[in-house]
Image (spheres, helix red, strand yellow):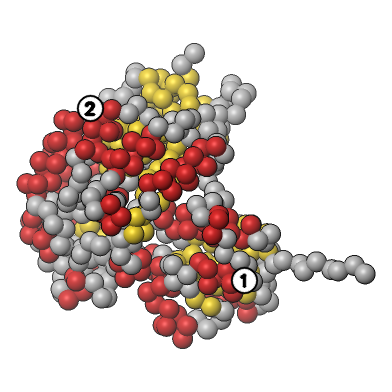
């Protein structure tokens, strides 16, 4: 007598938000595949019985995008195009009870640390032996490596601790194991991410261990680039700079969210740092790591920010000339420290201030890029698109930074995941153009 095998459902995973969410979705997909469940990611035409939406709840626009996506798939469920709809991630963690009432079409909501519970609902087993195993959603030559979860910082504007919990570091040996597994499968660039990477190790080892971690990871054979993201400026471990300068496969790149420069605003934000300390830190960074690329993010329109304080930030950025920059408009988040402050800057004014900051950065970026014309740089190519091979230098992280364009018409080989030397022939504010060096 033949026993009919149970047909496993097809699952469509939709990821919204930051790179930390991407890693969570990749981990979920790895677990599903280990349970012999067919899974696709962000597919235009998914034809799946089950949809899992990994949501973001960081700022108002991200929350609205998550809600709109949930409503879109809830409508598909109503029309019979899918059987089950599940929601996980930051928005679900923070607003689960509200969402259950307002969007009852969702079969279940899960928090940021409820992967085993989600898998159980799908009749799948949580495989502890697969810890760190993932299905990469981007080209395999680069991957994000999440070194910790959660955050212990008291920033008054930020709801991340409410959604992700307190800081929990992943042990160094475990991270080295995960990194080696990725490199063995073709990953050549690892991007270290966390809510606060500079806090790494304090919970496990009672001291900051980011430098030791980077040193260990940089010794992995065939790892060509190691890139550091989300370095909190207060308490920054300066020994990290020595490792970046010393190790040739660690990118001379640092992503350090500063948020503002006015000391009064920084105090209201509870950032634990002043304008003078930020300036001293940037000076040390540039002195100790020659040619380092500095990326940062800022918030426009924080409660009480005066036009003069906005102008102070604008002029400071024009003087300091950061290599890369992003700006968020302030989002009034309930249950955060700043929620008790009156949101004094209108949404229109917030956007105008943000636009002014980015317009200033446009000029800075164009000037810095034009200085690269004639230089030869190493480029890691990510994709072919619209007649160009498109890649990045060590000064650029995927999705958020500049790109290098190379005409593809006379190139017969695939360059995806390949490092090539490129001579820069022209430059715009955010992109470089060049030719292969023979």
Residue situated in front as seen by the camera: 212 or 261: 212
Is residue 190 in view from this perspective? yes
- Element marked by disc 2: loop
Residue situated in front as seen by the camera: 1 or 84: 1
Quarter assignment of residue 129 = bottom right
Q: CA distance from mark 1 to mark 2?
A: 51 Å
Earlier residue among tags 1 and 2: 1
Residue sitting at x 41%, y 82%: 98
Along the horizontal axis of the image, is 333 left or right of 376? Answer: left
Name the quadrant of the N terminus: bottom right
Residue sitting at x 19%, y 40%: 238
Sort mark 2 into few (<14), some (14-19) or many (20+) by Cα contacts within 10 Å. few
* Mark 1 or 2: the one toward you: 1
Quarter assignment of residue 403 = top left
Label of residue 290 in the image: 2
Give the residue at mark 1.
122
Sort mark 1 into few (<14), some (14-19) or many (20+) by Cα contacts within 10 Å. some
* Residue found at the very far top of the displayed protein: 438
Rendering coords of residue 217 (x, y %): 39, 38
Rendering coords of residue 210 (x, y %): 29, 44
- Element marked by disc 1: loop
Rendering coords of residue 265 (x, y %): 11, 60
Residue situated in front as seen by the camera: 226 or 377: 226
* Picture layout, residue 347 above or below residue 95: above
Is residue 402 in view from this perspective? no
Residue sitting at x 64%, y 71%: 123
């Amino acid at each position: 007598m033949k026993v009919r095998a149970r047909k496993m459902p097809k699952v469509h995973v939709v990821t919204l938000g930051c790179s930390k969410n991407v890693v969570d979705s990749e981990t979920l997909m790895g677990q599903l595949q280990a349970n012999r469940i067919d899974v696709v990611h962000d597919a235009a035409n998914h034809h799946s019985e089950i949809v899992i939406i990994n949501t973001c709840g960081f700022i108002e626009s991200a929350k609205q995008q998550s809600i709109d996506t949930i409503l879109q798939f809830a409508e598909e469920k109503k029309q019979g195009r899918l059987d089950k709809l599940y929601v996980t991630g930051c928005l679900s963690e923070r607003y689960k009870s509200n969402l259950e009432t307002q969007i009852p079409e969702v079969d279940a909501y899960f928090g940021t640390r409820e992967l085993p519970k989600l898998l159980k609902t799908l009749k799948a087993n949580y495989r502890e032996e697969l810890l760190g195993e993932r299905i990469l959603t981007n080209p395999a030559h680069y991957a994000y490596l999440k070194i910790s979860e959660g955050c212990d910082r008291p920033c008054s504007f930020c709801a991340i601790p409410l959604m992700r919990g307190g800081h929990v570091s992943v042990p160094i040996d475990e991270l080295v194991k995960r990194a080696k597994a990725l490199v063995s499968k073709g990953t050549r660039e690892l991007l270290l991410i966390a809510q606060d990477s500079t806090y790494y190790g304090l919970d496990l080892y009672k001291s900051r261990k980011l430098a030791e971690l980077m040193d260990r990871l940089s010794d992995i054979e065939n790892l060509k680039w190691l890139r550091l993201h989300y370095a909190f400026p207060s308490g920054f471990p300066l020994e990290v700079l020595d490792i970046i300068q010393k190790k040739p496969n660690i990118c001379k790149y640092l992503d350090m969210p500063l948020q503002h420069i006015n000391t009064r605003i920084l105090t209201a934000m509870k950032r634990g740092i002043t304008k003078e300390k930020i300036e001293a830190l940037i000076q040390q960074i540039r002195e100790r790591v020659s040619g380092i690329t500095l990326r940062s993010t800022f918030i426009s329109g924080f409660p009480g920010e005066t036009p003069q304080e906005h102008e102070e930030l604008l002029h400071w950025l024009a003087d300091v000339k950061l290599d890369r920059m992003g700006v968020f408009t302030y989002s009034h988040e309930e249950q955060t420290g700043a929620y008790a402050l009156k949101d004094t800057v209108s949404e229109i004014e917030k956007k105008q201030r943000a636009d002014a900051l980015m317009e200033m950065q446009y000029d800075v970026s164009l000037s810095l890029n034009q200085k690269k014309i004639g230089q030869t740089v190493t480029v890691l190519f990510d994709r072919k698109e619209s007649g160009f091979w498109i890649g990045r230098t060590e000064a650029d992280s995927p999705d958020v930074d500049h790109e290098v364009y190379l005409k593809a018409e006379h190139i017969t080989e695939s360059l995806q995941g390949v490092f090539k030397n490129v001579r820069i022939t022209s430059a715009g504010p955010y992109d470089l153009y060049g030719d292969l060096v023979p």
